[in-house]
Image (cartoon, rainbow, N blue to C red):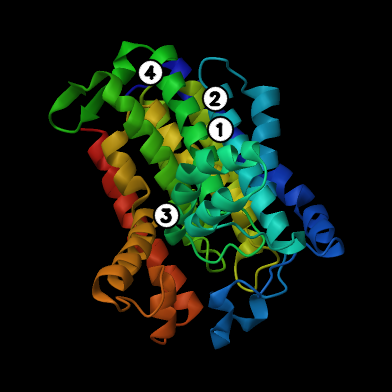
Amino acid sequence: MDLPLNAIRDLTSAIGFALISALVSFAWAPFLINFLYKHKIIRQSKYDPTLSIESRKDKANVPVMGGLLIIVTVAVLTVLFNWSRTYTWVPIGVMLLSAALGGVDDLLNIFGTKRRFRSVAQTVTLAKVHKSGWVRFYLWLTIPWVAFRRAVSVLGSNPGTGVHVHEKLLLQFAAGGMTAWWIFWKLGERWQSIDIPFAGAVDISWLIVPLIIFLVVFTANAVNIADGMDGLAGGMLIPTFAALSALSWFSGSRELALLNATIVGSLIAYTYFNIKPARFQMGDVGSLGLGALLAINAIAINQFIPLLLLGFMFYVEACTVLIQLAGRVILGRRVFKMAPIHHHFELKGWSEEKTIMRFWIVHLVFVILGVWLALH
C-alpha cells in the first residue's frame, strides 16, 4: 500500500529517535556504572530473601539504580526534541514522579536506617496514658491511618530501611490520579470510552478514572516485581514499547510514537549491560518509572484491552505474588516455591538463562497477539 508522506516521515523519525536514544545511552552508561560503583550504590543482601538461592549469591554487590540510564535519557531527549503539552508532558511527569519514588526506595534500602511503626494496639495504649491532651487527641485521630498502614503491609515484603508499602501506594495513587486527570479532562470525550476489539467503543464515563488509577499502580508494581533476574525485565520491555510505538504510529499519535521509540532505544542499551553477568540492575527507580509509563502510553492511545497482552508476563509475575499471599493466608501454605514465579522455576532447577529466554519468548508471543488484537 502507498503510505502518506507524513506517515513515512513519522516512521522514519521514530526509528531515528530509537537509534539516537540507544547511542546516547551507550555513550554515558560507563560513567553511570562507575558512579554507582564509586558511591557503593550496590544491592544489599540483608533484606533480600532471593539472595539465599545459591545461584544468586554473586548478585549481592551488583550496583542498583541502573534504570537511571533509561529514565534520564528518555526524559532529556523528550524535553529537548519531542516536548508536547498535549501528549508527552504528563507521561514524562508521571514517569519522573514514579522514578523518584523508586530512587528514594533504592537509596533508603542502602543508606537508610530501620524505621519502626506503632501497631494499632500500641497507639490506643499510648492515647490512653499520654499526659498531653493534644497528643492523646492526635493519637486517637491517627488510628485509622495506623490501621491502614498495618493492613496494606501484608502486600509487601520486609521493607528494611526502604519505603514502606503504604507510602508507595499513596504516591502511586497520586501518579495514577495525575494520569486520570489528563486522560479524562484534557484529551477529550473520546478517551472516556474503551475500545473493545471486534465490538467498538464502550462509553464508561467517569468510571474510567478509577480504572486508569488501578492500571497505572498495578502495572508499575508488576514491572517492579518482574525485575528480578539479569535481563528479564529489560528484554520483555523492549518488544512491549516497540509494539506501543507501532500502535501509536498507526493511530496517528506522532509524539507518543517517538516517545515509545526513544524508550526502546534506551532499553536496548540498558539490556546490553544488564545481561548476565549484569554490570548493574534496574532498581525501583527504573522499574516503577517504566511500569507507570507503560500503562500511560497504552491508555493514551486507548488500548486498555491489548495492554493486558502487551504487559502479559509482567501481570503474570504480579499475580503469582498475589496467589502466593492468598495461599499463605487462606491455605496456610505456599503455592509456589518462591514468588514471583521466575524464582519458582529457578528453585525447580532451571538456570537463570533458561528461565529468562523462555519468559522472553512467551512474552513476545503475547505482545504480537496484543498488536493483532489492537488492530481489530
Q: Is residue 321 above or below residue 139?
A: below
Which residue is labeled 4 in the image? 184
Q: Residue at x 65, y 69 (%)?
A: 278
Q: Mark 1 vs mark 4: which is more N-terminal?
A: 1
Q: Is residue 60 above or below residue 302?
A: below
Amino acid carrying mark 4 in the image: Phe
- Which mark is drawn over residue 151? 3
Q: Mark 4 vs mark 2: which is more N-terminal?
A: 2
Instruction: Give the position of the C terminus as an image quadrant.
Output: top left
Separation of residues labelled 3 and 4 (CA atoms):
31 Å
Q: Is residue 30 left or right of residue 223?
A: right
Q: Is residue 81 above or below residue 172?
A: above
Q: Is residue 248 left or right of residue 308?
A: right
Between residues 340 and 77, which one lies in front from this camera angle? 340
Q: Residues within 10 Å of mark 4 (few under 14, many from 20)?
A: many
Separation of residues labelled 1 and 2 (CA atoms):
6 Å
The reply to whether callout 1 and callout 3 are in contact (CB within 8 Å) is no
Judged by depth in the image, the label closer to the viewer, 1 or 3, is: 3
Q: Mark 2 vs mark 3: which is more N-terminal?
A: 2
Q: Mark 1 vs mark 3: which is more N-terminal?
A: 1
> Which quadrant holds residue 62?
bottom right
Which residue is labeled 1 in the image? 94
